Image: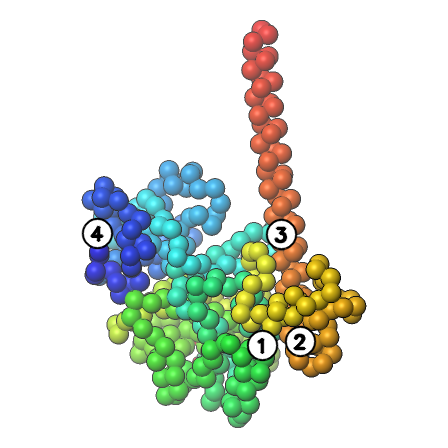
């Protein structure tokens, strides 16, 4: 076991993936930032600028297989501050979303996360439907925590906390501020060897909180525009910092929208609806028509809020659309493959006939 890597998040899961010869040839390192053409990776005491070897690029099937911030990679050293990446170790967890734009493809936000801090600010960003979007397809191995920041700008924090408890009773929540001692409510959560990602809208204070936890101002922060309280997208890349006291913190650029990626709505926060759905009269009930629908009945009876129900349907629809598109893409890829084979056979025949 590489004990000196433990503060960076190394453990048995990663150790078991490297064999004896790889152990001699390569050094494990963690990807702490992604630049346009290269990566920044970290070993215990050193950081390197690293590039991926060509063979690995050619062998990868999708963009998602290339190194991402949070990944453990195997490197060889080229120079005092340069390295090559030879492989990406299997991920323990990952946080994905649908890439912004028309293309229906996955974008990985971060990998090997233990805790996800969903940051909202209590001045004007508090929105539980948005929180539910982050949670809809979240990896069950990642522990989500809602972080309500800027308590100093809110005159009724207990009311907000009560609102969270009502709608999302199973979700952990922390009230904090980056400008006073309430940051200690957050600090208590940070533990050595664990990886914590901060996500949320621009301007909610992700980088400020991390700076405060580091007692440093390493990360750039900027005031929110007065007119519409929108942030300025100050952070432009995902980046990991490691606390001296232990704890791996990942800062991310503010997200304007978060469309979950992959599969079905599968989350503790919608387990109430899923439980009700088993009581609907029709097995394939889409919870839109009233007839025999236990979910709609629960909305009518105020057992679940209309917003919660509406958000669930919206997420289901988005994921269904994604599934249909990815099926089409897979079918098209297969068709191209078949075409290629036919062409090859034709050419072979032609050669034989000549
Ligand atoms: N009053 C108050 N201001 C805060 C708090 N946290 C952050 N801010 C301010 O909010 C503004 C935005 O903070 P950032 O840390 O840059 O926000 P961010 O979430 O990293 O934004 P992006 O990098 O754009 O995603 C800055 O002016 C901070 O000083 C807080 O708890 N209270
Ligand atoms: Mg930031
Ligand atoms: Zn139903």
- Give the crowd class for mark 2: few <14, some 14-19, many >=20 residues within 10 Å: few
Residue holding disc 3: 323
Horizontally, residue 107 falls left or right of residue 188, namely right
Query: To which residue does mark 2 refer?
Result: 307
Using residue 162 as the reference point, say whether residue 291 is left or right of it.
right
Find out if the beta carbon at label 4 lies less than 8 Å from the nearest ligand 2 atom: no
**Which badge, 1 or 3, comes first in the chain's sequence?**
1
Quarter residue 354 falls in: top right
Examine the rendering and report whether any part of residue 344 can be seen.
yes
Q: Nearer the viewer, residue 132 or 107?
A: 132
Residue 178, position as x, y percentages in the image: 41, 82
**Residue annotated with mark 1:** 128
Instruction: Determine crowd level at label 1: few under 14, some 14-19, many 20+ residues with C-alpha closer than 10 A.
Output: some
Q: Nearer the viewer, residue 350 or 263?
A: 263
Compared to 209, does 196 lie above or below?
above
Disc 4 + disc 1, Cβ < 8 Å: no
Residue where numbered disc 4 is placed: 80
């Amino acid at each position: 076991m590489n004990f000196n890597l433990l503060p960076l998040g190394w453990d048995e899961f990663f150790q078991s993936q490297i064999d004896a010869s790889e152990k001699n040839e390569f050094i494990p390192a963690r990807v702490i930032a992604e630049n346009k053409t290269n990566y920044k990776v970290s070993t215990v005491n050193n950081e390197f600028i690293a590039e991926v070897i060509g063979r690995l690029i050619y062998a990868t099937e999708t963009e998602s297989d290339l190194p991402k911030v949070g990944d453990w990679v195997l490197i060889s050293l080229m120079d005092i501050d340069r390295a090559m990446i030879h492989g990406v170790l299997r991920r323990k967890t990952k946080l994905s979303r649908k890439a912004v734009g028309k293309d229906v493809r996955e974008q990985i936000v971060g990998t090997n996360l233990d805790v996800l801090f969903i940051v909202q600010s209590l001045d004007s960003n508090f929105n539980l439907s948005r929180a539910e979007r982050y949670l809809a397809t979240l990896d069950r191995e990642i522990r989500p925590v809602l972080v309500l920041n800027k308590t100093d700008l809110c005159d009724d924090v207990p009311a907000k906390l009560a609102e969270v408890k009502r709608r999302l009773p199973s979700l952990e929540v922390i009230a904090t501020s980056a400008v006073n001692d309430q940051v200690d409510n957050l600090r208590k959560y940070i533990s050595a060897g664990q990886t914590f990602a901060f996500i949320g809208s621009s301007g909610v204070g992700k980088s400020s909180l991390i700076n405060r936890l580091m007692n440093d101002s390493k990360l750039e922060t900027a005031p929110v525009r007065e007119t519409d309280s929108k942030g300025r997208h100050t952070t432009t890349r995902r980046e990991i910092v490691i606390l001296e006291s232990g704890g791996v913190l990942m800062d991310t650029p503010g997200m304007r929208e978060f469309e979950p990626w992959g599969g079905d709505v599968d989350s503790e926060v919608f387990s109430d609806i899923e439980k009700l759905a088993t009581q609907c009269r029709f097995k394939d009930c889409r919870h839109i028509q009233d007839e025999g629908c236990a979910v709609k009945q629960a909305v009518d009876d105020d057992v679940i809020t209309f917003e919660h129900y509406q958000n669930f349907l919206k997420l289901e629809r988005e994921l269904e659309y994604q599934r249909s598109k990815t099926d089409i893409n897979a079918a098209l890829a297969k068709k191209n493959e078949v075409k290629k084979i036919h062409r090859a056979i034709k050419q072979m025949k032609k050669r034989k006939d000549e």
